[in-house]
Image (cartoon, rainbow, N blue to C red):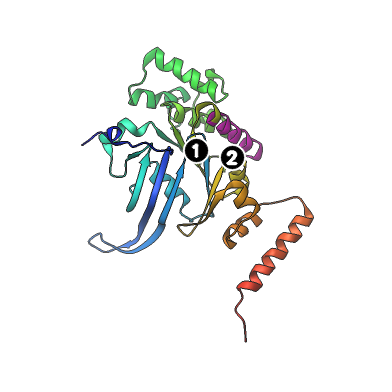
Amino acid sequence: MRDARAEATPTPYAVEGVDLRKTFPLRRSMWGRAIEQVVAVDGVSLAVEPGRTLGIVGESASGKSTVARMLAKLIPVDAGKVVWEGADVTELKGRALRPLRGRIQMIFQDPYGSLDGAYSVGYAVAEPLKVHRRASGSDARDRVAQLLERVNLDPRLAARRPGELSGGQRQRVSIARALALEPTALIADEPTSALDVSTRAEILNLLRELQQTMDLAIVLISHDFATIRHLAHRVAVMHRGRIVEEGTASQVVNDPQDPYTRRLLDSVPVPNVEEQRRRRERLHSSADTARPSSG
């Protein structure tokens, strides 16, 4: 198979999804054919440039995590294209994809579930270096120490196991492992939802700092507009497998156009009593507008 790197075309984007579609079977026949399906993603197109963050926000089952996994080439697409730095990787898999795999890395929601508790932190961070033959032996140990320091962890933690660390420390280890192959883009799927409030801010600030120093493109998946607003330059709002609104973070947050976006924003807790009153009035107004006339 041809090397995808030779087919790359100039593009301003680090990662793109073009008209992505994905269905999952709910029920199969006795011969294994899908006789009932759910549409998880239906015609989603998006892109993110180096040094920028695209936030994808929506409630559970909106399709945002499925988009993340398609962009990271963890699951195949039913239709559409996945493009990394100008190279169409939609049909690539196995050995053909391996030379490009380090360019796009993923950070998962549960830092404990994504780390094998049977192995040390140092082993987890060094594993991609060894698999891709980037470093071994003392070189790998030195690189692990550098990566842990980059995410503000003591290199001596390399000897510990994930179960000995806090949730925030484990997520930093996951980020260090994602950085091992020097990617151009990170896809972060709910990276802070399993953490307490103060630790969430630390992890988001770390991602922003890494983005600035490494010119990383970041796709940030979240159900929480407060998290998205903290880091994203552009926002795509997903509902039932489709993007219902997209724009700069300022546009979407301050002047939402779609009723679903307004409902998501109104679900963000605020301490201001007056703002809470205005939200209730907007919700009642929306409900009255949507209610059919009895005449």
Q: Residue at image x 28%, y 44%?
A: 91
The magenta segment is: 196-211
Mark 2 vs mark 1: which is more N-terminal? Answer: 1
Q: Which quarter of the rendered picture does the C terminus lie within?
A: bottom right
Q: Is residue 191 left or right of residue 135?
A: right
Viewer-side residue, 116 vs 253: 253
At which x and y percent is residue 18?
38, 49
Q: Is residue 73 visible?
A: no
- Is 269 drawn above or below residue 105 in the view shown? below
Callout 2, which amino acid? Answer: Leu
Viewer-side residue, 7 vs 239: 7
- Is 227 drawn above or below residue 79 in the view shown? above
Reading the image, the residue beneath label 2 is: 231
Main SS category, magenta section: helix
Q: Which disc is residue 177 wearing?
A: none
Q: Which disc is residue 218 wearing?
A: 1
Cβ–Cβ under 8 Å for marks 2 and 1: yes
At which x and y percent is residue 90?
31, 44
Q: Residue at image x 55%, y 45%?
A: 234
Callout 1, which amino acid? Answer: Ile
At which x and y percent is residue 181?
41, 26
Mark 2 Cα within 10 Å, few/some/many (few <14, many 20+)? some
At which x and y percent is residue 217?
48, 36
